[in-house]
Image (cartoon, rainbow, N blue to C red):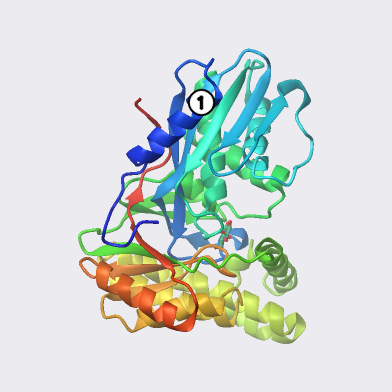
Amino acid sequence: MADAGMRQSSSAPEELVREVLHAFRARHPEAGAPKLFFAPGRVNLMGAHLDYSGGAVLPAAIDRGTLIAVAPRSDGKVLFSSSLQAGEHLFELDGLPQAATGSWVDYPLGVLREALSRAEERPGGASLHFGGNLPIGAGLSSSASICVGTALALDKVWGLGHQEIDHVHAALSAEREFVGVQCGIMDPYAVGLARAGSLLWLECGDVRYEHLPLDTSRVSILVADTMVRRELATSAFNQRVDECRRAFELLKRSQPEARCLAEVSMETLSACGEELGPVLSRRAGHVIAEVARTKVARVGLLAGQPEVLGAKMLEAHASLRGLYEVSCPELDRLVEVAGACDEVLGGRLTGAGFGGACVFLVERGGEERVSAELKQGFREAFDHDPEVAVFQAVGGPYELEI
Ligand code: GLA
């Protein structure tokens, strides 16, 4: 990531475009001119760990993401390669793997299977080369960026005539059914349906959404990546999903009209504490309070009071640390340092947690000072620097003119 305040890149910076085109042409000298697509990553500001419990979330797509060069083939094969990973992966359209392979290629492969299942005629094949500038494992949804981008690229190169919502569905099925992550719906929706300058208000239970403007003349989105990546992040995430499922199973006996954990009331939770036990009570306690916080944040945003959103982000972090137990000392340190900066309206860990990044809402003009404070405060406690950058809220995936 570039330093905060120093550079605010366009969605697909020129050097990245050049690098991906160069890599594609070097690998496929025989192919004609490729098409080029960009899909953003996303950062979630409110509604932490609510999507798989049916609550509302408030993410923005960001000006870092995945760039894909694609050209058609006529030999019935699809080839995936990446500037970020070694090796090439060649698949016969007639003999695609039935199970995930354990490599990065599972994401585009899962989308390829979805695209084929929705295609009216068997396509001839394609070569795709991936590049990008999104940190992997930072909680900024590199996987949804790859998946939604692949769905768009295959749609356009094969003329499938799909809509943007089809790309979102293909990405979600690929991750859930092929890769095997029990993820909620937030990431592909945030990436696929984003509008520039807006946050996406997405009610994950009913799958209703609207775009809420973020007043970027007053506030900036600043992200600080701890650079900490935890091996157990995926299994710990799946464990939280399972804990919420079990908590809801028990709670709905006392509140049968609730369709999901996000609809359970605090009164029901208080009455069922003993039955749930301490761990499930803490998980449900986070979810139910976060639902309320997220609604308040929305009202504040619509009333032109981003400081209300900021305050709720800080409360969310405390709950993610104490009740949901998905924070870590590095994330807590960033929030602590930011909390002492006057220009910071609020912030919290973003994504699944267990390492990764924090997102902060910062008053316009304060980005450089906050960035410097975060770096210094973090460095005093740990032996490396966080990466800090200002992100723009951008629109969804698109084809580049080349
Ligand atoms: C991960 C998942 C999302 C969401 C967040 C937590 O990033 O991919 O679906 O559950 O964690 O809010």
What percent of the width, then of the height, locates residue 39? 45, 41
Q: Residue at x 27, y 67 (%)?
A: 367
**Relative to the observer, which residue lies in front, 363 or 78?**
78
**Count the marks: how many?**
1
Task: Answer with left or right where residue 278 lies relative to residue 51.
Answer: right
Neighbour class for label 1 at 10 Å: few (<14), some, many (≥20)?
A: few
What percent of the width, then of the height, locates residue 175? 65, 46
Q: Residue at x 76, y 82 (%)?
A: 275
Splitting the image into four quadrants, where does ligand 1 fall? bottom right
Is residue 162 something that shows in the picture?
no
Is residue 58 something that shows in the picture?
yes
Whether 83 is drawn above or below 47: the answer is: above
**Relative to the observer, which residue lies in front, 284 or 317?**
317
Q: Amino acid at mark 1?
A: Ala
Task: Answer with left or right where residue 312 lies relative to residue 142.
Answer: left
What percent of the width, then of the height, locates residue 29? 52, 18
Whether 46 is drawn above or below 66: the answer is: below
**Mark 1 residue element:** helix
In the image, the residue with mark 1 has its CB under 8 Å from the nearest atom of ligand 1: no
The residue identified by callout 1 is 26
Hey, which residue is sitting farthest top in the picture?
74
Quarter of the rendering containing residue 101: top right
Task: Answer with left or right where residue 115 lies relative to residue 341.
Answer: right
